[in-house]
Image (spheres, grey):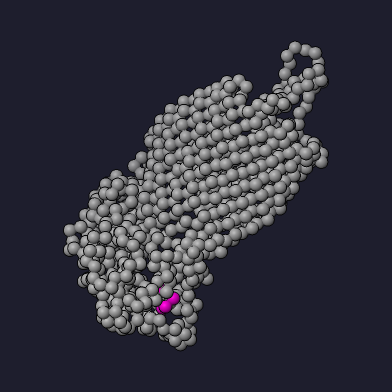
């Protein structure tokens, strides 16, 4: 910005250019004027503002468009078109090098990667599920990038424990401008095309900016052949040779006998430490980034007829779509040569002749059905479940194309509408509302097949955020600036960490129905036709273990687990062309201390699932007091109210599974590291009191019930209130020296992901709550995880030397 001071006949006109106005901060500009001398058209100017920011109580660093361009390749070039490269050039922050794509790590003043707040033109854009930023920090449309390394004011929109970043979007100017950027790079692929145009009417009552761009680049590692010459020493381990000197199995880990021995090779690549074969040097590294960006910013001025000023309406849109593809395709390994079917060699280790899709099954009927008689028609209710994002073609056995890579897709769309009403020359009221939709998808077909370190097979997270803010600012006098603000935000979130594609394989995920008493089907007790009248455990993991995985036969007529591994495939027909499914067979009439029934408890869905709804309120009151021209003091208080609405975890067959867990699970802190144990695996009958259970070294009375409670069966909520006083000040010794100091309490809501744990499958106790959390004291789906609190104290002094050099010690 520029500041002009003029008073005809009193002082000479003065223009101070290059003034940076920082979000949520006060800036003091000292104007040295000269007495008016009657001359013709003399204007005194200073080329740029000084490096020392008088009146600013926080350490804030600003990067303009020119500086962004100069620092484009900082950190390795992976963020040449994003603000992360410019951040890497600033003090007070560490940006690890060689990153690319969305959400690159930035550690401000030692804080963790998720303790940094992000704003887009003043709008907070950290999503509440995991506190990740929704924006891409693209350089397209970026007028300025501001980094706060602490001491945020009480009125700041974004509240990071260690600091925050604010990306200011360009606006139109008069006269207008237009920029076309076409770039191509080599030897790595780099293509960029962007157009930016902006303009305004002469009276600035209408201004507009439009930026559109697309960027594509691919990365190479070590050399243009992706380090192929280094595979034998630094390749990624992917398999174990089962023959050769000293390398009998993966578990042998005979590092002496297996270390780079010449006993066996895969196409000239020796086995590495522990007998592991080494594969592609670049496996799981980012391979390609495709980025599309759109920015639109319009300001409309509404002139006042009385005082000559005007109000302002802003309409802002920002959106991006980003693909990150990784070196995970069959071809990235080296092609079919690495798919050797010989036992223990290659990616397949004696399996299929080439990488294939893994797909699952789905029962299309409702859960909770009770079958007291045979129903062969249910065979038609089981259908195949294709691997996601394959257009319905990713069925079991279909080959994965040699060039198909696992990828991450994410993006967002932000709409902001703001109205600022200027009240005279000393106060204004600003209100805005915004909509933010963001998405984040993983697709890892290759990893699903080779079971190696890779991207999740199918992780989906999408968030609809809505928010509004109202701010009133009034300069009460030459010494006091009052700031009052209120903020509200909420989000509708779905996190679906989907692994349903594996339920057609062996294991408990294919289990669909249990053999229960027709008189009391939800009691949590199951029965076995081979052992009639004896209560058995219903837990799927237990029965799969005791039955040895149910290696064959008609699983629906076997034992208390009823379906066993591959159950859905036996109800229906899977894979296609196999023997037709039997549907639901007739249950036993006597094995359950009376008539039995098949209780359909699962439909094949399997995922950790989260739909917690955050509702955040904030209110702040702040006074900036300027007792002298040299001293600025800022007093503020902020109240944050963090509310989380739980999803209902009841319904379906959840009561059955909670009963099934509580009927058989016992615990002793010294037994199996405190993990609950099924009493039937210790030789006791299902439903026996845990006080009667014993184990070697653990006498009767050693165990207690490992009870789980479905506390959020009907939903619910939790609220955390945080009161945060803050104080900051700055003292200006002169035009070249400034002292800053601050102290404050800051909070950050715990991730919505941590507030409640749920699953798409019905067996929540056995899937998540018991095995993962019971030993840590969590016995319900909801976890009381309070906000993180930080007490920040800052003291810094800044000095400017001649020739535009400054130093700051903090």
Q: Is residue 713 left or right of residue 349?
A: right
Q: Residue 450: tell me if it is visible.
A: no
Residue, x 67% and y 38% (percent of image)?
Answer: 429
Quarter of the N terminus within the rendering: top right
Q: Residue furthest top?
A: 40
Q: Position of residue 297 (x, y in %)?
A: 54, 32
* Magenta span includes 752: no
The one of 632 and 663 positioned closer to us in this rendering: 663
The one of 578 and 45 positioned closer to us in this rendering: 578
Asked which quadrant contains residue 562, the reply is bottom left
The one of 25 and 53 positioned closer to us in this rendering: 25
Q: Position of residue 510 (x, y in %)?
A: 30, 65
Q: Is residue 585 left or right of residue 19?
A: left
Residue, x 36% and y 40% (percent of image)?
Answer: 224
Tell me if residue 218 comes above or below residue 612 in the rendering: above
Q: Position of residue 649 (x, y in %)?
A: 46, 63
Classified by dominant secondary structure, the portion drawn in magenta counts as: helix
Residue, x 46% and y 31% (percent of image)?
Answer: 212
* Magenta span includes 663: yes
Tell me if residue 685 comes above or below residue 717 in the rendering: below
Q: Position of residue 248 (x, y in %)?
A: 28, 67
Span of residues in magenta = 660-664
């Amino acid at each position: 910005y520029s500041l002009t001071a003029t008073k005809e006949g009193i002082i000479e006109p003065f223009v101070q250019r290059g003034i940076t106005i920082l979000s949520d901060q006060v800036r003091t500009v000292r104007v040295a004027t000269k007495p008016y001398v009657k001359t013709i058209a003399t204007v005194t100017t200073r080329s740029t503002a000084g490096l020392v920011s008088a009146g600013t109580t926080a350490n804030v660093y600003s990067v303009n468009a020119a500086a962004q361009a100069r620092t484009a390749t900082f950190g390795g070039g992976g963020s040449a078109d994003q603000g992360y490269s410019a951040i890497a050039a600033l003090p007070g922050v560490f940006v690890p090098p060689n990153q690319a794509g969305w959400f690159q790590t930035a550690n401000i003043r030692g804080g963790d990667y998720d303790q940094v707040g992000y704003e887009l033109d003043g709008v907070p854009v950290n999503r509440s599920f995991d506190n990740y930023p929704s924006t891409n920090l693209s350089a397209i449309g970026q007028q300025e990038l501001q980094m706060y390394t602490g001491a945020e004011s009480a009125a700041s929109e974004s509240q990071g424990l260690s600091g925050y970043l604010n990306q200011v979007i360009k606006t139109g100017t008069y006269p207008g401008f237009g920029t076309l950027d076409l770039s191509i790079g080599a030897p790595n692929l780099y293509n960029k095309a962007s157009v930016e145009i902006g303009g305004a009417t002469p009276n600035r009552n209408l201004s507009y900016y439009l930026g559109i761009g697309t960027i594509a680049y691919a990365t190479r590692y070590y050399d243009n052949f992706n380090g192929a010459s280094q595979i034998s020493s630094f390749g990624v381990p992917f398999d174990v040779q089962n023959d050769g000197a000293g390398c009998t199995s993966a578990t042998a880990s005979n590092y002496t006998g297996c270390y780079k021995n010449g006993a066996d090779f895969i196409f000239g690549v020796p086995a590495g430490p522990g007998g592991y074969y080494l594969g592609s040097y670049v496996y799981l590294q980012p391979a390609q980034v495709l980025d599309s960006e759109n920015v639109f910013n319009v300001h409309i001025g509404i002139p006042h007829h009385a005082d000559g000023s005007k109000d302002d309406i802003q309409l802002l849109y920002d959106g991006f779509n980003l693909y990150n593809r990784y070196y995970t395709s069959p071809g990235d390994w080296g092609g079919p040569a690495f798919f050797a079917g010989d036992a223990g060699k290659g990616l397949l280790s004696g399996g299929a002749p080439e990488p294939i899709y893994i797909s699952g099954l789905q029962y299309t009927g409702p859960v909770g059905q009770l079958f007291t008689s045979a129903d062969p028609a249910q065979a038609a209710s089981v259908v195949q479940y294709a691997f996601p994002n394959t257009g319905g073609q990713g069925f079991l056995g279909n080959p994965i194309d040699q060039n198909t890579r696992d990828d991450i897709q994410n993006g967002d769309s932000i709409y902001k509408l703001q109205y600022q009403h200027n009240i005279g020359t000393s106060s204004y009221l600003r209100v805005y509302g915004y909509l933010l939709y963001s998405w984040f998808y993983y697709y890892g077909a290759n990893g699903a097949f080779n079971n190696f370190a890779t991207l999740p097979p199918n992780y989906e997270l999408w968030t609809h955020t809505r928010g509004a803010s109202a701010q009133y600012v009034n300069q009460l006098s030459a010494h006091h600036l009052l700031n009052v603000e209120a903020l509200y935000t909420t989000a509708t979130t779905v996190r679906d960490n989907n692994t349903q594609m594996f339920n057609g394989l062996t294991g408990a995920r294919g289990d669909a129905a249990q053999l229960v008493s027709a008189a009391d089907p939800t009691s949590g007790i199951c029965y076995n036709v081979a052992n009639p009248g004896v209560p058995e455990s219903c837990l799927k993991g237990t029965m799969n273990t005791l039955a040895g995985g149910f290696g064959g036969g008609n699983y629906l007529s076997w034992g208390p687990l009823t379906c066993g591994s591959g159950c859905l495939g036996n109800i229906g027909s899977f894979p296609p062309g196999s023997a037709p499914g039997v549907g639901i067979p007739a249950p036993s009439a006597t094995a359950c201390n009376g008539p039995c029934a098949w209780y359909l408890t699962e439909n094949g869905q399997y995922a950790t699932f989260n739909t917690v709804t955050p509702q955040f309120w904030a209110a702040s009151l702040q006074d900036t007091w300027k007792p002298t021209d040299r001293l600025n003091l800022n007093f503020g208080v902020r109240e944050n109210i963090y509310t989380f609405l739980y999803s209902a975890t009841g319904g379906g067959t959840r009561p059955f599974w909670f009963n099934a867990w509580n009927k058989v699970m016992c615990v002793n802190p010294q037994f199996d590291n405190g993990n609950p144990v099924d009493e039937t695996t210790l030789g006791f009958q299902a439903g026996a009191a845990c006080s009667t259970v014993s184990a070697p070294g653990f006498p009767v009375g050693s165990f207690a019930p490992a009870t789980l409670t479905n506390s959020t069966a009907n939903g619910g909520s939790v609220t955390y209130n945080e009161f945060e006083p803050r104080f900051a000040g700055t003292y200006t010794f002169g035009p070249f020296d400034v002292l800053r100091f601050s102290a404050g309490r800051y909070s950050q809501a715990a991730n919505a992901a941590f507030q409640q744990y749920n699953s798409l499958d019905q067996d929540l106790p056995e899937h998540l709550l018991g095995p993962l959390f019971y030993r840590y004291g969590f016995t319900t789906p909801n976890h009381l995880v309070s906000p993180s609190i930080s007490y920040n104290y800052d003291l810094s002094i800044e000095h400017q030397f001649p020739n535009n050099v400054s130093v700051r010690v903090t």
